[in-house]
Image: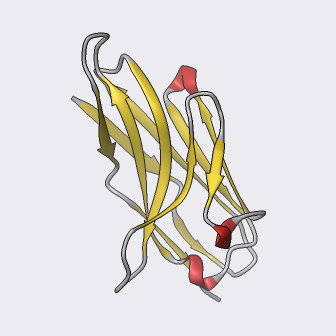
Amino acid sequence: QVQLEESGGGLVQPGGSLRLSCAASGSIFSINAMGWYRQAPGKQRELVAAISSGGSTNYIDSVKGRFTISRDNAKNTVYLQMNSLKPEDTAVYYCNADVRRTFFSTSHEYWGQGTQVTVSS
């Protein structure tokens, strides 16, 4: 099996920063894309940022210039540095990874349990 463990969420004032981490563990041969999604109350889950195995990144427009996604392939870990946080960034943030468990297998998506980020004064 594959587990994704997130950490780093919490309560922060507007304009503040948080750094989310997500470590993948278990039976892993390789990881393709990794990403961060979020879901605010009453809204659909949306992709915030994604990063390929080679380091190419993309972001939703509302976080460009404020959030940075990165990964450490040796540690099977993805990060999301969030700066200049706004109240509208408040949501549960989920880690996602596209994982191949063996050389012979196809890849499958796995999800973390989610971590709450609250931006409020």
Picture quadrant where residue 67 is located: bottom right
Measuring from the top left, give residue 27's x and y in whole percent: 28, 20
Judged left or right of residue 28, residue 71 is right
Q: Considering the image in quadrants, where does the N terminus appear?
A: top left
Specify how the rendered protein is coloured: secondary structure
Q: Nearer the viewer, residue 64 or 24?
A: 64
Instruction: List the single residue furthest toward the top.
Output: 103
- What residue is rendered at 66% in x and 73% in y? 62
Q: Is residue 103 above or below residue 11?
A: above
Measuring from the top left, give residue 36's x and y in whole percent: 49, 54
- What residue is rendered at 70% in x and 81% in y? 14
Measuring from the top left, give residue 85's x and y in whole percent: 68, 74
Q: Is residue 45 above or below residue 29?
A: below
Picture quadrant where residue 63 is located: bottom right
Q: Is residue 31 above or below residue 8?
A: above
Measuring from the top left, give residue 6's x and y in whole percent: 43, 49
Instruction: List the single residue furthest toward the left.
Output: 1
Q: Considering the image in quadrants, where does the C terminus appear?
A: bottom right
- The number of callouts visible is 0
Picture quadrant where residue 115 is located: bottom left
Q: Is residue 20 above or below residue 119?
A: above
- What residue is rendered at 40% in x and 47% in y? 96
